[in-house]
Image (cartoon, helix red, strand yellow):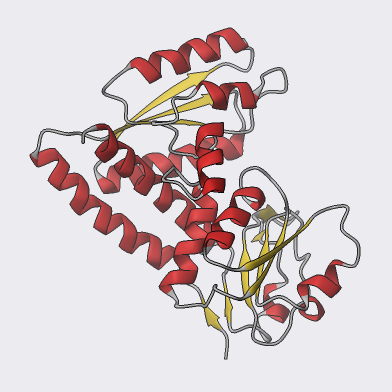
């Protein structure tokens, strides 16, 4: 029988434990503080930063927003990042993506001090993750690993297939799974016969942004399926990349959408902010 992975419940538990850490830091006169930069008026981005603000409030992290216009120049953006880098009261910095097309997000990620890069996108943290060194891990892959561990789902020696090769999920998740001794295959838009690959997987992670892409005949019996996708249908309903009703009949474990990976992403962001605060105050 399939067990549904409760990302929302696990995220709540993580936030409660982090609040205890933050309370202890405050007793020492240390107040974790997080800064978010949003460029433009993307509606989804506004929802995401509102959720981050709410999570900070629950954990006890101070929060500040820097809202920039759609026409912000690269120089203005880099100057703001530089100011936040130098501000010792700021422990974590996040640049909300996507950016307007005229801005270079990779240049902006390089500018963020890797010690405050709580999203894990500065090349220093990306490289350290690949080398198995201490770093900030991108929040969604980090949350996926935490869910697998919480539910005692074996990773070592298992075959994991990731569908999607983004810098945000697919690529860092490769390193996370390799560090747990999984055998990892990544599929993408140019991969042929994806079904033949996914049917061999013990763990399937979908992160491609296509509603109901993963069908029951693409999954072997007893597999674990992690659905990263968040897609809004024409009727307003939110669905993932997985045909949940059908696929869940074959799996051992599966994440729902919503209530699966999404809450864990924000919980691990809170975790990274607390880690950054502790590291900067050693």
Write down the quadrant of residue 158 in the picture: bottom right
Residue at 33% x, 59% y: name it.
14
Return the residue nearer the eye: 151 or 60: 151
- Image quadrant in which you'd find residue 117: top left
Residue 212 percent across, percent down from the top left: 75, 66
* 71 displayed left or right of 89: right
State whether residue 10 is above or below residue 176.
below
Question: Where in the figure is residue 137, as x and y percent of width and height?
Answer: 48, 47
**Residue at point 45%, 78% (across, down):** 152
Q: Eyeballing the image, is 10 above or below 92?
A: below
Q: Note whether residue 36 is visible.
A: yes
Which residue shows up at 57% across the image and 85% down it?
2
Residue 47 visible in this rendered orientation of the protein = no
Assign the N terminus to one quadrant of the image: bottom right
Which residue is farthest left? Answer: 27
Q: Quadrant of the C terminus?
A: top left
């Amino acid at each position: 029988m399939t067990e549904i992975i409760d990302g929302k419940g696990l995220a709540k538990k993580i936030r409660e434990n982090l609040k205890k850490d933050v309370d202890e830091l405050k007793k020492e006169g240390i107040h974790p503080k997080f800064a978010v930069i949003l460029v433009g008026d993307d509606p989804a981005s506004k929802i995401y930063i509102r959720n981050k603000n709410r999570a900070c409030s629950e954990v006890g992290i101070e929060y500040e927003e820097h809202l920039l216009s759609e026409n912000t120049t690269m120089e203005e953006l880099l100057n703001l990042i530089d100011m936040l880098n130098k501000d010792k009261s700021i422990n974590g910095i996040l640049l909300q993506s996507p950016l307007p097309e005229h801005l270079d997000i990779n240049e902006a990620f390089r500018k963020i001090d890797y010690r405050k890069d709580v999203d894990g996108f500065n090349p220093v943290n990306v490289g350290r993750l690949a080398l198995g060194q201490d770093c900030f891990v991108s929040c969604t892959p980090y949350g996926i690993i935490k869910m697998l561990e919480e539910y005692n789902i074996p990773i070592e020696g298992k075959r994991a297939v990731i569908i999607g090769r983004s810098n945000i999920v697919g690529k860092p998740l490769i390193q996370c799974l390799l560090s747990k001794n999984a055998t990892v295959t990544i599929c993408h838009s140019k991969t042929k016969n994806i079904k033949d690959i996914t049917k061999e997987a013990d763990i399937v992670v979908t992160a491609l942004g296509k509603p109901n892409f993963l069908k029951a005949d693409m999954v072997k019996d007893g597999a674990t399926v992690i659905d990263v996708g968040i897609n809004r249908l024409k009727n307003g309903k939110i669905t993932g990349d997985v045909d949940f009703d059908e696929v869940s009949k074959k799996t051992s474990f599966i994440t729902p959408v919503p209530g699966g990976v999404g809450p864990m992403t924000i919980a691990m962001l809170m975790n990274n902010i607390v880690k950054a605060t502790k590291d900067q105050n050693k």
